[in-house]
Each structure stands twice: as C-alpha cells, then as structure tokens.
Amino acid sequence: MQIQGTTYPIADYLQMLERGEVSVNRDYQRSPGIWPVSARSFLVETVLRNFPVPKLSLHQKTDPVSLRPFKELVDGQQRTFALKDFYDGKFRLSVRLEEERLHGKFFNDLNDDDKRQFLNYGLSLDLLVGADDAEVREVFRRMNTFTVPLNYEEQRHANFDGPFKWFIRGLANEYAEPFVDAGVFKERGLLRMADAKLFTELSHAYFKGITTTNAKHLDSVYKDHDIDFDEEGDLGGRLRSALDLLLSWASVRNGPLLTRTHVFYSLILATMHAQSPLSSIVPQVDPIEGVLDPTTASGNLEILASALSISEEDEPITADKFAEFIKASTDKTNVREQRLTRTRWLYWALMGALD
C-alpha cells in the first residue's frame, strides 16, 4: 500500500464525480443529507476565503474487467456533496456567514472572482494506492486512535447548528485576539473553544440566573435556542458593551480578574448588571441606584485584583476585609454560592460601593 498526497481543483474533482471516476463507498460513509445548510455554507465560505479544508481520502482501485483505475471516496462524503450541490445550485448560502457579500447567494449569483476562487480551489486528497479493504480499514482505525477526543464545547458545536451556535461562534471570533492580548486565554484555550464555553456560561446566567452548571445545563441553552433566538440582539449588545469596557481598562488587563476564567465570568456578569440590571440576577444581586463611573470602577477593580495577587503569595488573608471575595475566587470556584459571592463583590466595586 502507498499513500500518495495530491491536489485537485474543485472543478476537476466535480468533473471526476460527474464522469463516475469517483464513487462513494457506503461501507465507510454515512448517508447523505446529514449536514444542514448552515454547515454546508460554512464549508463553501471556507473555500471562498481560501482557508484550508480537511483532506479527503480516496481508495484507488482497478476494475478487474476493464483494468481501468477508479477511485472510491472513503472519507469526505459530506464535504464532497456540499461542494457539488452548491455548484449545482441546490442550496443558497446562509445569511449567518461572516462574509456579508455571500449571504443568500447561489453559485450563479457569485461575482466572477468568487466563482474562479471556488472552481480553482485546490482540494487536498490522500490516495490509498495498492491497498486492500482490510488495509483501508486499518488506516482509519489508526487515524481515529490518534484523534484528540472532542471536549463538551466542541461536541455542542458539532451537534447543534441553530442560531445560538452561530451567535457563540461569532462572539468567539470577534474577541479572540482581544482575549489573547488581555491575558484571558492562551491560543491553546481558543483552539479547544474555552472562549465559546465562557460565552455559553454567561448566556446560561442571562437566561437562568447565577447557578452551578454542568454539561447538561449548557447543552440546554443550545437546544432551547436551536431554532428561535429572539434574545440575540439584547444578549449580544449587553455582552459586547461589558467586554468592550472591561478590555479597555489597563488596570485589569493581564491581571487575576481576567486571567482566572471563573473570576472573569463573574466580572462580565457584574459589569452587564451594572450597566443595566439583568432581570435574571436581580433577585440574587440587589441593584444599587446610580450609574457606573469608569474611573471609580476601574480603581476599585484594581484593589480587588491586588487582594487576589497578595493571596497568591501566601500572606494571611483571614482578617483581610476581602477574605470572602478571595475565598470565593480560590475555592469551589464554579458552584453557585461562590459565583454569587464573586459577582456581588465585583458589582459593588463597579458601582463604587466597595466600602
């Protein structure tokens, strides 16, 4: 068996399908139609933006009668038929794509540059040459052995494809670089969708209040808003307003209020509540009359950040006025009571009521 890497322009690959030179091996592939339009659109947008698409794998075989070579598609059916169906005009691109010029477009609606990009895009393929069926199966067993299992957040984004999923993905893209610059996440965390998990946790609190959450709770946010997501405008506006304010303050950037994700979760909620009371947490965090003053707020947050930094140096904190906040930031950090305590202290700081 030999594995030969090669590249075909999409135009050539689609012609090979049309001529029957490539067929689908149903023993390896799921039935067609699994991908929804939004996922298919995302693949097409990936091609049009010239980003990499995962390799397809084909088993090159020889017809025993005609001795003519042919290829069986053993990995990449969904990608193949998404590209083919788009070219054949069977679906229009989703209006949730990042590139607005592509919204609602069929292939024939694309401008000439985009059509050329689509047809000339090089699909990377692995040809399994001289392999028998047992060897092909072993190839995929070994590939799956070395595949990193999906974490819960990656599973959610694989299992759901409604407006809430794309809302979370949009926020993650929008704040990826600002988060890295401010020390919230490292690149590895972004690759494993830690930022998407944070946004999902915040969304759960927006809907349900501050609680202890688990994978089932976070799944429910996606499930409940997989078809209709009427709150998208309000939630998105609140999150962006809070994040833009917090990330603009040099006093908190790269400090423990941001670098500890569980504290940052509470800080974002507290800021959203300070800018305009959140009905879901009003019973948990009593609103204070007045408005958020940025100078006072950032100064108070710096005080709390310093208290956390001192605690990291193992100095006594039992008599410290911020002991409750520090304990809630270091012990059982993602349970309801600690989350509530942190959010209250951070809210008081933002509203100038730290004393």
Image (cartoon, rainbow, N blue to C red):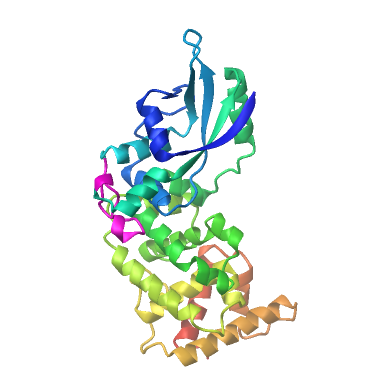
**Is residue 32 depicted above or below 70 in this figure?**
below
Q: Quadrant of residue 283?
A: bottom left
Residue 353, position in %: x, y? 47, 89
Residue 55, position in %: x, y? 52, 39
Is there any visible trace of residue 286 in the rendered image? Answer: no
Residue 205, position in %: x, y? 41, 64
Please tell me whether residue 72 belongs to the stretch shown in magenta: no
Relative depth, front residue between 227 and 308:
227
Number of numbered discs visible in the structure rendering: 0
Looking at the image, which residue sits at the far right? 314
Placement of the N terminus among the 4 image quadrants: top right
Relative depth, front residue between 245 and 139:
139
Start and end of the magenta stretch? 91-108
Q: Quadrant of residue 239?
A: bottom left
**Is residue 86 depicted above or below 139 in this figure?**
below
Q: Is residue 269 left or right of residue 185?
A: left
Looking at the image, which residue sits at the far top? 65
Q: Main secondary structure of the magenta part?
A: loop
Residue 13, position in %: x, y? 42, 34
Q: Is residue 77 left or right of residue 114?
A: right
Residue pictured at 29% horizontal, 59% vertical:
101
Is there any visible trace of residue 177 in the rendered image? Answer: yes
**Is residue 101 depicted above or below 28 in this figure?**
below
Residue pictured at 48% horizontal, 87% vertical:
297
